[in-house]
Image (tube, coloured by chain):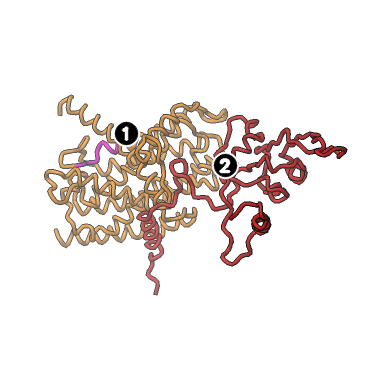
């Protein structure tokens, strides 16, 4: 038989027990939070990798990426050869007041120029300061963590295989660098 | 009693009136937070937010003094004072130690109960004068609650007065002995529950039920007047806890009571105040009809039963 009032006693017991436990509050400004890997804090740019292909700017659902570029002529290296052109990045800016952190630009970049950094403390008093120009985006790159290690029996990344082959070929040449 | 003594006693009561409610309020902040797995205030004043209520007070004072256009201005402005002052007056007659009392009245218990009823009038005045339907609803709920719970509250107190054979609070404490905890146990429960309801503390906070009638009678209040209402609530907790201690828990009785008796009263008062907070965290708000049923079908018969038990006890031991 259920004792009358046992529910009331249980309510008191639960709250009292909870009081004796450590609270679960995160002490954020005093202690940094432990963020999961691949947290979406801010987008970093490796300017050297960017070819101004505009894929990210066009795929962005909120149109928050601004890219300006021009073409430079590279003179032909051989006699009678054809001059080449290459894209030079003039401006690359992300307006984080519009960005919705969907990660599409990072997925779509064919040259791995964009990366997620877990840094999140970049609030500003003026909304216009949330537009990060390319030098600021380049600075965020230093905060990007190394990619997660592969699984134990996973295939090595394709880039590693290619680099290994090139190194082997170079070593096989008689005048090449000796291992 | 010389003039100097009167001044000293009055100032001491005033100091207690200003300090104890803040202590209870801060305890509520922290205890409630920890019971819910939170930390509560941590920054104000530096050490674990001890000055949070001081900061709140400063904030309230800075706010604009607003009175709604349609409000009954005089009543509206008077209400917080009417709500707060009775608790100050009640504190005047509650004894802390033997002889340590603002004014030892012969009819102390009668006086305290009468004065505590006035406190509720302040809330009722606020509800009526605000010219706001939520305030009015809250005010009517306050009135209904006061009517329902005043009866068991007074009956439970009467039981102790009967057992002690005196209406003086000092006399009741002097007559108290530990086995009263058993003999007057029902009265203790009834008195505490009815007192909670009279203070409109959760789980009896139907008049202010913020989920349905905004904030009841206090809806239109802001700034200092609102702060006074809140202060009245905490002063009410102190008075109820002190009264429960004095009437049922033996006041200054305890080991070494002739030297540190007043400490015993304070410790017991704060223990009861802790229970008031604890109950608030543990239980959900009662519905209006449940509230009325508890009073009329639960507490009133229990209080009458206690009166009968007390009467038999008094006659048998006399």
| Disc 2: CA contacts within 10 A as few (<14), some (14-19) or many (>=20) | few
In the figure, is residue A69 to the left or right of B149? Answer: right
Instruction: Kindly identify which chain the residue marked by label 2 belongs to.
Output: A
In the figure, is residue A74 to the left or right of B233? Answer: right
Q: Quadrant of residue B262?
A: top left
The quarter of the picture where the C terminus of chain B appears is bottom left
| Disc 1: CA contacts within 10 A as few (<14), some (14-19) or many (>=20) | some
Q: Residue at x 21, y 54 (%)?
A: B163
From which residue to which does the magenta span run?
A: B88-96
Q: Which chain is orange?
A: B
Q: How many marks?
A: 2
SS assignment for the magenta stretch, majority: helix
Q: Which residue is mark 2?
A: A142
Q: Position of residue B270 (x, y in %)?
A: 28, 46
Colour for chain A in the figure? red
Query: Circle 2 sits in a helix, a strand or a loop, which is it?
Result: helix
Nearer to the camera, B52 or B90: B52
- Does the stretch in magenta take in B188? no
Q: Quadrant of residue A43?
A: top right
Q: Alpha-carbon distance for marks 1 and 2?
A: 56 Å
Q: Which residue is mark 1?
A: B18
Q: Residue at x 57, y 36 (%)?
A: A123
């Amino acid at each position: 038989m259920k004792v009358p009032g046992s529910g009331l006693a249980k309510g008191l017991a639960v709250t009292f027990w909870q009081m004796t436990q450590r609270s679960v509050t995160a002490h954020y400004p005093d202690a940094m939070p432990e963020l999961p890997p691949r947290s979406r804090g801010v987008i970093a740019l490796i300017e050297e990798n960017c070819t101004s292909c505009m894929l990210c700017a066009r795929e962005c659902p909120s149109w928050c990426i601004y890219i300006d570029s021009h073409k430079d002529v590279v003179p032909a290296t051989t006699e009678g050869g054809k001059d080449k052109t290459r894209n030079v990045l003039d401006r690359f800016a992300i307006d984080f007041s519009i960005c919705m952190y969907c990660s599409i630009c990072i997925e779509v970049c064919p040259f791995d120029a964009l990366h997620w950094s877990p840094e999140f403390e970049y609030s500003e008093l003026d909304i216009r300061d949330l537009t990060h120009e390319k030098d600021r985006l380049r600075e965020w790159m230093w905060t990007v963590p190394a990619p997660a290690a592969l699984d134990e029996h996973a295939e090595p990344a394709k880039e590693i295989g290619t680099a290994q082959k090139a190194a082997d070929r170079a070593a096989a040449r008689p005048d090449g660098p000796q291992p | 009693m010389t003039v100097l003594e009167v001044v000293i006693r009055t100032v001491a009561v005033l100091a207690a009136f200003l300090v104890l409610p803040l202590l209870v309020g801060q305890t509520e902040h922290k205890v409630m937070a920890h019971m819910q797995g939170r930390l509560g205030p941590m920054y104000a004043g530096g050490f674990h937010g001890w000055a949070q209520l001081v900061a709140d007070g400063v904030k309230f004072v800075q706010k604009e003094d607003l009175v709604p256009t349609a409000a009954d201005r005089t009543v509206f402005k008077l209400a917080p004072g009417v709500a707060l002052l009775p608790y100050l007056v009640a504190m005047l007659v509650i004894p802390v130690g033997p002889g340590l009392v603002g004014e030892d009245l012969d009819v102390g218990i009668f006086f305290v109960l009468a004065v505590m009823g006035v406190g509720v009038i302040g809330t009722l005045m606020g509800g009526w004068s605000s010219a706001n339907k939520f305030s009015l609803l809250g005010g009517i709920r306050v009135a209904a609650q006061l009517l329902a719970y005043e009866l068991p509250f007074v009956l439970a107190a009467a039981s102790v007065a009967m057992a002690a054979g005196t209406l003086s609070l000092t006399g009741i404490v002097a007559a108290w002995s530990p086995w009263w905890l058993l003999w007057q146990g029902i009265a203790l429960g009834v008195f505490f529950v009815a007192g909670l309801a009279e203070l409109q503390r959760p789980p009896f906070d139907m008049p202010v039920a913020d989920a349905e009638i905004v904030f009841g009678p206090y809806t239109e209040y802001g700034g200092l007047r609102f702060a006074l209402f809140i202060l009245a609530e905490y002063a009410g907790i102190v008075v109820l806890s002190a009264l429960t201690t004095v009437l049922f828990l033996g006041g200054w009785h305890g080991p070494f009571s002739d030297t540190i008796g007043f400490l015993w009263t304070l410790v017991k008062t704060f223990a009861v105040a802790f229970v008031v907070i604890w109950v608030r965290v543990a239980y959900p708000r009662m519905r209006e009809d449940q509230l009325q049923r508890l009073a009329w079908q639960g507490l009133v018969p229990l209080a009458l039963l206690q009166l009968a038990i007390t009467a038999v006890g008094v006659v048998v031991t006399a």
